[in-house]
Image (spheres, grey):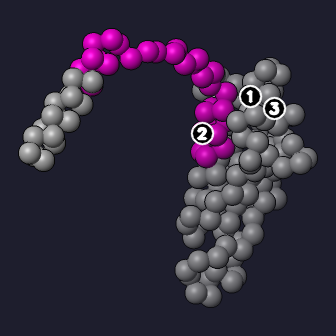
Amino acid sequence: MRSRDGWWSVRDLVLADGTVIPESLLRTTTSRSGGPGGQHVNKVETRVTIEVSVDALPLPEEKRARIRERLAGRINKDGDLRVTTQATRSQIENRDRALLRLEELLNGAMVEQKKRKKTRVTRAAKEKRLEEKKKRSETKRLRKI
């Protein structure tokens, strides 16, 4: 979609829980990308960076806290979550990839992880392991004779 000023606009993000993050909260910037492409690389800005302020997300505080905790390495000191991509030579494709990646990150971070149940090794499994060790030991002992 082209906006009024001629630049490509981004779309709203729809998360797995149905939450809609409006495009007005997303900041998109472009820059020159590295990699193959010859002179083309030096002329066009195909790398796309999308930022969103975690504090501005229309989510309950518990989900925002979970996002801050799980995506701490991607959130800068200002509280902005940043996704950058330069996988293709097309700015539009890179923008779409960055939006998808942002959706994936947010959906993954908001999922409540199940608590791990502690388990124990069964008595039968312990006995079987010890029996196998005894057999192996006996085999090796007999080789020495």
Instruction: Indicate the position of residue 106 as horizontal and vertical percent values.
Output: 67, 35
Q: Is residue 24 above or below residue 89?
A: above
Q: Is residue 86 visible?
A: yes
Residue at (78% x, 60% y) in the render:
29
Q: Secondary structure at mark 3?
A: loop
Q: Amino acid at mark 3?
A: Leu
In this view of the protein, which residue sits in the foreground, 19 or 118?
118
Considering the whole magenta stretch, tell me its main secondary structure: helix
Mark sitting earlier along the chain (3/1): 3
The quarter of the displayed image where residue 129 is located: top left
Residue at (64% x, 60% y) in the render:
85
User: Mark 3 sits on what residue?
Assistant: 57
Residue at (87% x, 43% y) in the render:
79
Instruction: Indicate the position of residue 81 as horizontal and vertical percent values.
Output: 78, 45
Residue 104, label in figure: 2
**Figure quadrant of the C terminus:** top left
Q: Amino acid at mark 1?
A: Arg
User: Mark 1 sits on what residue?
Assistant: 66
Which span is picked out in magenta? Answer: 100-129
Dot 1: within a 10 Å radius of its alpha carbon, few (fewer than 14), some, or many (20 or more) residues?
A: some
Q: Residue furthest bottom?
A: 39
Q: Secondary structure at mark 2?
A: helix
Instruction: Indicate the position of residue 124 as horizontal and vertical percent values.
Output: 27, 13
Q: Secondary structure at mark 1?
A: helix
Mark sitting earlier along the chain (3/2): 3
Query: Do callouts 3 and 2 mark residues in contact (Cβ within 8 Å)?
Result: no
Q: Amino acid at mark 2?
A: Glu
Q: Residue furthest right?
A: 78
Left or right? Give the position of 43 relative to 132.
right
